[in-house]
Image: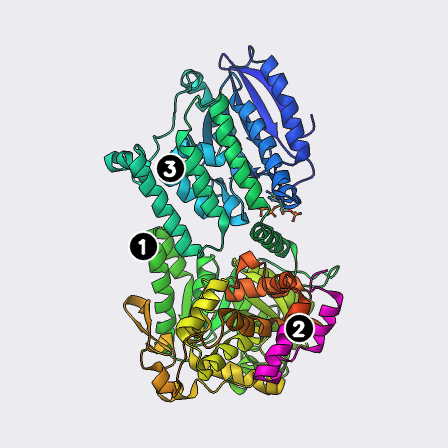
Amino acid sequence: MKNFELLVRSVGGHSLAFLYFDLKGEKVNKFNREVIAEFESLIPELKRRAGEIEALILFSKKPGNFIAGADITLFQAARTAEEAQALSEAGQNLLNEWEDLPFPRVVAINGACLGGGCELSLASSAILMSNDSGARIGLPETLLGVIPGMGGCVRMPWKVGIAQALDLILSGKTLTGEKAYKAGLADGLLQKENFETSSIEWVCKNLERLKRGERIGKPPKLGGMGGVTGSLLENNPLGRSVVFKKARSGVLSKTKGQYPAPIEAIDVISETGTGYQKNFRGVDRARAMKREAEGFGKMAATDVSKNCIRLFFLTEAIKKANGLPEGVEAPTKKIQSAAVLGAGVMGGGIAHLLADKGISVRMKDVGIPGLELGIQSALTLFNKSLKRRSITERQFQQKLAKISPTTSYDGFLGAEVVVEAIVEKMEVKQSVLKELEDFVSKDAVIATNTSSLSVSRMQSVMRHPERFCGMHFFNPVHKMPLVEVIRGEKSSDQSVSQIFQFSKQIGKTPIVVRDAPGFLVNRLLMPYLTEAAIMVSEGVRIEELDPALLEFGMPMGPIELIDEIGLDVAEKVGHILHDGFGERMSPPGTFEKLLEKKRLGKKSGSGFYIYSGPEKKEKRLDSGIYDLLGIRPLTGKITKQEMVDRCVFGMINEAARCLQEKIVAAPEDVDLGMIMGTGFPPFRGGLLRYADSVGLEKIVNVLQELKGKYGMRFAPSDALLAFAKNGKFYP
Ligand code: COA
C-alpha cells in the first residue's frame, strides 16, 4: 500500500489496528481516485482480519492536516450532473462499507478535517479531536456551490441535531476541537501534546462502550439550544418544519436565491437526514444516500459551483505567489514590528488590523486628539470581538497593548514596514515621506495607503524610492479582504514582494497593480457609480435601480454604495479619474446639490438615503430626495436589464483597457480584485468570467446601442474589440 499503512498490535491487552494516512507527494490528504481505490482495497483485508481487530484508530501522518476532503478537481471536471452523482455514489459506498465494518472505528483528528474527511468521521464510531487551534472539522461544501455528497447531509443531523447540522452545512464553518466537543460532534477532546498516545488510551478506556455502539460524546443540542424546548422542536414533525422553514428563509434573505446549494442541502436534509440513526442500514440508508447523491450531482453541474471552485483555486494560487513575474524571486521576511503614519479612519483601521495579527505597531499622528481617535476606533473593534467572544479578556489586553501611540518618530527605527495613511494631498505626503526616511532603518519598506494619488510621483522625492510602493486597503479595513499592492516606477522587486507577502501575513488577498489613476478597483468602480448617478439624474428611480443591482448579486445597490463611500470621496476620486482619462470619465454632477447641503452619505447621517439608529444601521430613502435634486422620477423608465447593463458593461469596457495597459497581469487579477474589493458576486466568477459567460460579441453590440442612446462613454474600447475578436477574456 502506498498511501495507507495498516498495523495491528496489542496495546494494554487489546488488539488494536492502526491505520495511518499519508498521501504521497501532497501537502494535504484528500480523496482522489487513487486514494479511493486504495481505501476500497483495504476493506476486504479489514473484514478478513475482523476476528483479530478489537478496534481501529485512523491517524493522519500529515502535520496540521487530517483529510482536506474529496479532491475538488475531481468534481470540478465532471461535465454532467450524472457524472458528478456517480462520484458521490462511489464515495458514499466506500463510507458505507467503512461504517459496516464489524469493529469500532475511531478517527483521531489533529489537523484540518473537512468535507469528505468529516464525512468519513461521521461514518466512524467515535471522533477524537486535539485541542490544537489548527484541528478543525466541518463541511465547507456549500461554499464551493455543492452539498456534502459522501453522507454528510444524512449523518450530520443524527450526530449533532438538525438545527446544528443545518448551521454547520449552510454556513460551511469549521469547528475547533473544543467547539466540536461541545456540539456533540467530537466524542473526545484531547491535549495536542502526546495526542497519539492519549487517543490510544482513550480507545482502550472506552473499548467496551465502543463495542456496544454507545454514543460517548455529549448528546446533540437539539434545536441548537438543547433542553426541553430543543427536543420539542426536533422530535416532532411540526417542530422540525419550523426549523427548516427558518433555515430556508434565513438562506433566502442572505443569498437572495442566487446560491442554489444551501437550499438543496435543506431539501436533502429534510428528506433524508431526519431519519438517520444508529443502525440505519439497508434500503433506508440506500434511499437517503441516493437522494443526497442526486442533489450533489445537480449542484456540481451548476455554473455557480464551477465559479465558486474557480475562486477557491484563485485564492489558493495567491497563497503561493510572491507578487512578482514568474521566475523572479526577492527575499522577504515575516514582519513583527510596523509603524503607521496617520491615525484617521484608515490609519486607525490598519493599526487595529496589525495589532490583531500580533504585530507591534507604532501609530503616529500630529496631535493627541487625532491619536485618541485612532486608539478609540481600534478599541471599539476589539471590544466587539470581546463581546462576540472571539477573543478573551486577556487577548483583548494583549492586542490593544500592541499599539503604541506617539506624536514623534520615536520607535520608528525598529519598524520593518511603515504604512503611510495621512491626508490625501500630494505635497503633504511628499514632505512627510522625505522626513520619514531619516527616522527608519535602512531595510524598512515604506508603503502608502493612498487610494488616488500617484505612487511614482510620491516616491520621486525620496532618497530611496526603491523601498517604496503602494498598499491600498479598502474601507473598512478589518472587513474588506483586498489589498492593491501598487508598483511605482522605481519600486524594487523586493519592496513589492515584501508588501505582497505582508498583506497575506495579515490575512488579506493582495493583487499587484501598476501605478495609474484609480489603480484597478476604483478605476473600474467609478464608471459603475457614475452611470448609476447619471441614471438617477435622468429620472430612474433609486427604488428600482438599487434593487436591480442587488438582484444581479452586488452586496449593495450603487446609490447606497455612493453613500457608504461618501459623496465627497466619490467626487474627489471621480475628478482624479476625469483628469487621468478625460471625457469618458466625466463626473455626473448629481452630487453637487447634496454636497452643498453637506449631505456626505452615511458618515454624515444622510446622502441619498437617511441613516438612523445604532451605528446608523437603519436606512430609508429620503422622500424629498428627487425635489432636492430637481428631478422628476419616472417609475419603469428603463428596464432592469438596461440598468444592470449600463452599470456593469461600462466596467467590462474599462477592464479590457486595464488588461491591455497591463494595469494588472491577467484576467484573474481583475476578477479577484472585483470580488474581494467590491463584493462583485462570486457566483458569477468575477467581472470578466461574467463577461465571457454573456459573450463579448453581445456586450460589444449592447455597448454600441447604449452609445447611440446615451453617448460616447459607451463606445466599445479598442481593447474590448480586440478581446471580442478572440472571443473571450480567459484563454
Ligand atoms: N481538493 C483538491 N486540492 C486540495 C484540496 C481539496 N479538497 N484541499 C487542498 N488542496 C490543495 C490546495 O489547492 C493546494 O494545492 P497546491 O499546492 O497545488 O496549490 C494544496 O492542496 C495545499 O493546500 P493549502 O491550502 O496550501 O494548505 P493549507 O494548509 O493552507 O490549507 C486546507 C489546508 C485543507 C485548510 C485548505 O486547503 C482547504 O480549505 N481546502 C479545501 C477543503 C474543502 O473545501 N474540502 C471540501 C471539498 S468538497
- The answer to which of 92 and 579 lies nearer the viewer is 92
Q: Is residue 258 above or below residue 114?
A: below
Q: CA distance from mark 3 to mark 2?
A: 49 Å
Residue 716, image x and y in percent? 66, 77
x 39%, y 72%: residue = 543
Kind of residue at disc 3 = Ile
- For the residue pair 127 and 378, the one nearer the viewer reads as 127
Labels 1 and 2 touching (C-beta < 8 A): no
Tell which circle, 1 or 2, labels the residue nearer the N-terminal end.
1
The image quadrant of residue 695 is bottom right
Residue 177 vs residue 606: left or right?
Answer: right
Distance CA(mark 1)–CA(mark 2): 51 Å
Closer to the N terminus: mark 1 or mark 3?
Answer: 3
- Residue 525 visible to an observer of this rendering: no
User: What is the image's colouring?
Assistant: rainbow
Determine which of the numbered discs, if any, sits on residue 162 in the image: 3
Toward which corner of the image does residue 612 lie, by quadrant? bottom left
Does 719 lie within the magenta span?
Answer: yes
Magenta residues, start to end: 702-731
Residue at mark 1 to residue at mark 3: CA–CA distance: 27 Å
Mark 3 C-beta closer than 8 Å to ligand 1: no
> Which residue, given by chain and number where applicable, does mark 2 sit on?
700
